[in-house]
Amino acid sequence: MIKAVLSMLLVLVVVSSTFAKYIPKSGKRVPQTLSRGWGDQLIWAQTYEEGLYWSRSRNKPLMVIFHLPDCPHSQALKKVFSEDNEIQKSLDEEFIVLNLMYETTDKHLSPDGQYVPRILFVDPTMTVRADITGRYANRMYAYEPSDIKLLTTNMAKAKKLLKSEL
Amino acid sequence: MIKAVLSMLLVLVVVSSTFAKYIPKSGKRVPQTLSRGWGDQLIWAQTYEEGLYWSRSRNKPLMVIFHLPDCPHSQALKKVFSEDNEIQKSLDEEFIVLNLMYETTDKHLSPDGQYVPRILFVDPTMTVRADITGRYANRMYAYEPSDIKLLTTNMAKAKKLLKSEL
């Protein structure tokens, strides 16, 4: 009897280990999203290379957001940013978007240093628009939640594309 | 009466446009995941820079998977890969993982060309392990679904870290 129970248990273990999906010891995780809360309905580029490719091929400006999960300024901006339907609609229809938590190797994306939150625009000619700045002289590409209208204005500037030299 | 109905409608429109979340014209989208189906329970690096940083700081090898959504070979490998609990567990506990649909600027990640699917290992010393290869002479870093045991063997090789010169 004990033998029968044991072998049934063994069969159960084998069956469940064969068919059950892997679950980490620390418990099931919610899959990470590319949006990271900056706009779940937008189609995000994964990498800077991908963003540049889409920007060139679709002739749309690229917005690059640098942020960190444990930075309260990033989180505050993200809340306002993701809930602003005007910004979300314009980004979806007229921009390529990329959000990054790690710096790239391209120094053009940090004209005045590496800080977060920081928003840079890149023209389809692959020129970083260092001329499109926020309100703060010491951190020219930083935005506070109260600067969201300025960000909208800057998006309008970025939509006026530079002429390609070709 | 008609006036009252109209003004109520107007209020409703204003209220809904203020509070409703942005939804694209083409309909609501499922947020993109970083895993892209290669293992929803794994913690994926977003970019190569991020993967290298994690690999160095945690002293774990990095696995980089190049794939494309419309490549049947990528999709077939992905199915076997994501359902293999041994691989998923080992990747979760002993590796840093990155999957990319676009090439990086680092030529070391394409020792014999840019094709998909292609799996490269990178040592925490930031050395691409070009010595860890698959079964095919013309595409040395390609794996078919039937090569999944070879991939496991290669993961074991990658876990034997190169000694840092420091």
Image: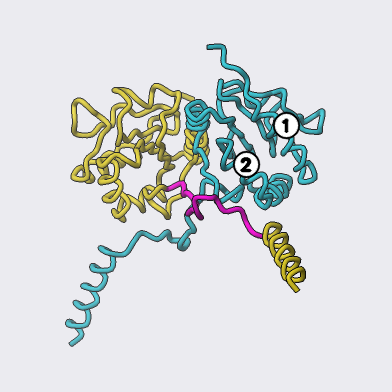
Chain colours: A cyan, B yellow
Name the chain under label 2.
A
Q: What residue do we see at 70% from left, 66% from top?
A: B9
Q: Quadrant of the N terminus of chain B?
A: bottom right
The quarter holding residue B15 reads bottom right
| Numbered tag placed on residue A141 in the rendering | 1
The answer to which of B156 and A58 lies nearer the viewer is A58
Which residue of the protein is positioned furthest toward the top in this rendering? A166
* Kind of residue at badge 1: Tyr
Q: Residue B40: x, y in percent?
A: 41, 54
Name the chain under label 1.
A
Q: Is residue A119 above or below residue A112?
A: below
Q: Left or right: where does residue A87 sit relative to residue A136?
A: left
Q: Left or right: where does residue A134 sit relative to residue A84?
A: right
Which residue of the protein is positioned furthest toward the front in this rendering? B2
The answer to which of A53 and A115 lies nearer the viewer is A53
Callouts 1 and 2 on one subunit: yes
Q: Is residue A42 above or below residue B109?
A: below
The quarter holding residue B115 reads top left
Neighbor class of circle 2 (other Cα within 10 Å; few <14, some 14-19, many 20+) is few
Q: Is residue B121 above or below residue A77?
A: above
Q: What residue do we see at 43% from left, 51% from top?
A: B42
Q: CA distance from mark 1 to mark 2?
A: 20 Å
Q: Which residue is tagged 2?
A: A90
Q: Which residues are magenta?
A: B20-35
Q: What residue do we see at 57% from left, 23% from top?
A: A106
Q: Residue B126: x, y in percent?
A: 44, 28
